[in-house]
Every structure is written in structure tokens, then in C-alpha cells.
Amino acid sequence: MKLKTLLVCALILTNQAAYAASAKVIKLKDGSQIIGEVISANNGEYTVRTENLGEVSINDENILSIQAAGLSTNADASSAFGSANLKEQVQSVQSQIVNDGAIMDDIKALSENKEIQAILQNPELMSTIMSFDEKRIQNDPSVKKLLERKDVQDIMKQIESKITPAGK
């Protein structure tokens, strides 16, 4: 089950970067917020284009949540990162996905699906994914809904056939 969790995390995080053309609110662990467009996510580092600061890089260890601008959340602000090992593996897979044009094309197509967009805009989902808590991820209703979709299953099979997780 860990491989499925790893793949869904990498897929969701990569999709967030691919779908990031709209403004996002990035809540940081220090209580501050950054509003901008996520233009890339690679090796645990998000690059965000902001109106006031220009382009800034944010390490994912400093991020509490990422959500579409205008959404509010009751996410637990004290959510800590779970398994460092899972986090490292997700980052490794995410880096490989970003460098695979065919997979990225499929992810971009997936991100244009209105039903997928609705699922991914659930503010609790990113909080769950960013927790890197395997049980929490596996039990998340949005993750379960995504995993039931054939198009998501197909992309995960494609990723699994091409990608080697770190430490595997």
C-alpha cells in the first residue's frame, strides 16, 4: 500500500504544480501567507510568482497548506510532517515525473477535468498530502475518490512503470 500512497502523493503534488496557473494562498508554518502563482515544484522546493515580491522559493518543510485563493479552511494548523522517508520518496518521484513529458501531458489533461479540479480544491486535501502521514493519506475521502477513477489509475500505472522511488 505504501507504493500507492507514494504515487498518489507525487501525482497530486505534481498536478498542483501543473494546475497552478491560478492564484494560490500558501500558508506557512510561521503564520505568514504568500499569495501567488506556483510556477514550479521540484525537489521539495516551490517557486511562486507573487505580485509584490516577484519570484520566491519556498521549501515545502515551511508550508502548512496550499489552496486556491478565496477558499477558507479549518485545517489543523499544527499538522506536522509525517514520515521523512515517504516525503523523500515523493520528492524523488515528483522530480522524475516533471522530467517525463508524456506523464506531464497526461497530468495536465487530468487537471483540466472539472471533477478532478473540484476534488483538488478541497483545502483539507493538500493539508493531508503535506502531512506525509501514510494512514491519514490512505483514509482521506478525496484521495479515495481519486484512486477510484480509471484515468487516475492509468496515470499511476504509467508512473509506476517508469519511475523508481528513492530507496527502492
Image (tube, rainbow, N blue to C red):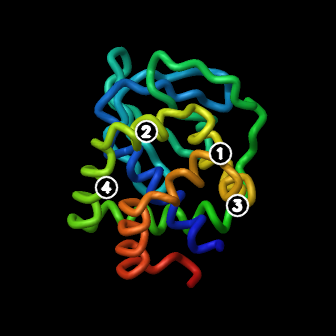
Give the labeled residue for mark 4: 107
Is the C-beta separation of discs 1 and 4 under 8 Å? no
- Give the label, 3 or 2, closer to the camera: 3
Q: Secondary structure at mark 1?
A: helix
Instruction: Identify which residue, 118 or 68, lies in the foreground.
Output: 118
Q: Which mark is residue 128?
A: 1
Cα separation between marks 3 and 2: 26 Å
The answer to which of marks 3 and 2 sits earlier in the sequence is: 2
Residue 127 placement, left or right of 150: right
- Quadrant including the N terminus: bottom right
- Quadrant including the C terminus: bottom right
Residue 91 placed where, x, y %?
50, 61
Q: Amino acid at mark 4?
A: Ile
The answer to which of marks 4 and 2 sits earlier in the sequence is: 2
Is the C-beta separation of discs 4 and 2 under 8 Å? no
Q: Secondary structure at mark 4?
A: helix
The answer to which of marks 1 and 4 sits earlier in the sequence is: 4
Give the labeled residue for mark 2: 57
- Quarter of image, res 57: top left
Residue at the image point whose x is 44% and y is 58% from the top: 149
Is the C-beta separation of discs 3 and 4 under 8 Å? no
Q: Secondary structure at mark 3?
A: helix
Q: Secondary structure at mark 2?
A: strand
Residue at the image point whose x is 58% and y is 74% from the top: 3
Give the labeled residue for mark 3: 134
Q: Amino acid at mark 3?
A: Glu
Is the C-beta separation of discs 1 and 3 under 8 Å? no
The answer to which of marks 3 and 4 sits earlier in the sequence is: 4
Cα separation between marks 1 and 3: 9 Å
Cα separation between marks 3 and 4: 22 Å
Q: Amino acid at mark 1?
A: Thr
Cα separation between marks 4 and 2: 23 Å
